Amino acid sequence: VKTLKDAGHHVVEEDLYKGRFDAALSAAERQSYYSTQYDYSAVQNEVDKLVAAEAIVLFFPTWWFSFPAILKGWFDRAWGPGITFDHANKYSFLKPRLLQLRKMLAVTTLDSPWWVDQLVMRKPVKRVLKTGLFQACAPKCKFEMLSLYKCERLTAAQVQRFTDRITRVFNSWV
Amino acid sequence: VKTLKDAGHHVVEEDLYKGRFDAALSAAERQSYYSTQYDYSAVQNEVDKLVAAEAIVLFFPTWWFSFPAILKGWFDRAWGPGITFDHANKYSFLKPRLLQLRKMLAVTTLDSPWWVDQLVMRKPVKRVLKTGLFQACAPKCKFEMLSLYKCERLTAAQVQRFTDRITRVFNSWV
């Protein structure tokens, strides 16, 4: 099996740049965040895809040890209350809503070497993704992450080995 | 002294929302990132303010243990090569360029309690800001950060104590 499509999965692509996704949560959206109903009408399309997914694959570059702004905007706007979580009462944190989500894979590139990300920075992107977002909102989801370090100075063989790792994860899903 | 202005400092405000700042680094900008000259013409105004500053104060909410998208976009687009750093050769990391910057204060709000940010998440926002951005690009800059935890359920007195802490930092600057 080469792709998830070959294995009979229904694959829906979301290219935030192609769709000219507006990254900034608006003041009106923020005001509605703690009202009875968060108003996500401007990102309805992204929300529909998100809540229908049983698996999510994120491909993104890591810039400044964090998400590109446009991807952060997807979390700020589409991962709202009533969608991926409900507000907690005072005894708990978020109440998760992405209960149908079973698998997620994050694939990223960094120019930094592995030890700066892991030992100096303590893996901020992985920690925010895994603990802050997916474990909080999708407790049944198996989380995997592949990071391509020193991505500006790789040989073709090194890139190939990395893409092989992505394929192996997909093969384990089918 | 109540404000930095009272102390004779020239204070320039930058409200990214008011200026409708476009957070997404464009494909053309990214292509120019590794060319001889990064093309930051679309964010010239933000760059001019940034390189002229001797001190920076950032006010922002922390969402999902990271920057709001619009602030991340400011780092993605205005903190480019030839502005805040130069590309490293293979023996070093970034070469810093913000050598005139002496002080920075980050002020943020989080709904999470302090121990989740610090013990579970390992302070991802502070680590990215301090180590990833300011220590890399502005080595002479003294870094301070004030975090207001559990910000959705505070008394007026608690908020006042926090604003007093901000004032104390400003007073130490004048």
Image (spheres, coloured by chain):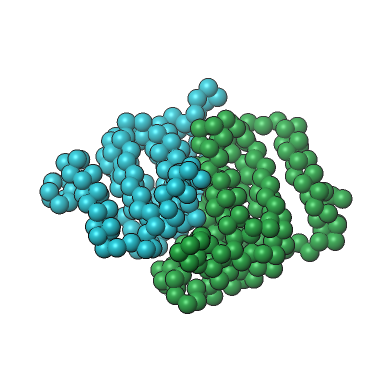
Chain colours: A cyan, B green
Residue closer to the observer: A60 or B63? A60
Would you say residue A12 is visible in this rendering? no
Quarter of the view holding residue B15? bottom right
Return the x and y of residue A17 as percentages of the image width and height: 38, 62
Residue B86 vertical position relative to residue A95 in the rendered view, above or below:
below
Residue closer to the observer: B124 or B165? B124
Indicate left or right for B73 with B166 as reference.
left
Would you say residue B160 is visible in this rendering? yes
Indicate left or right for A2 with A120 as reference.
left
Q: Split into 4 quadrants, where in the image is the C terminus of chain A?
A: top left
Residue B154 vertical position relative to residue B129 in the rendered view, above or below:
above
Return the x and y of residue A169 as percentages of the image width and height: 23, 44
Return the x and y of residue B164 as percentages of the image width and height: 78, 40
Identified at 53% across, 43% down, the residue is: B124
**Total marks placed:** 0
Return the x and y of residue B144 as percentages of the image width and height: 68, 47
Q: Residue lying at the far top in this picture: please name it.
A: A91
Identified at 65% across, 53% down, the residue is: B58
Identified at 51% across, 60% down, the residue is: B93
Q: Residue lying at the far bottom in this picture: please name it.
A: B36
Indicate left or right for B5 with A108 as reference.
right
Identified at 50% across, 73% down, the residue is: B38
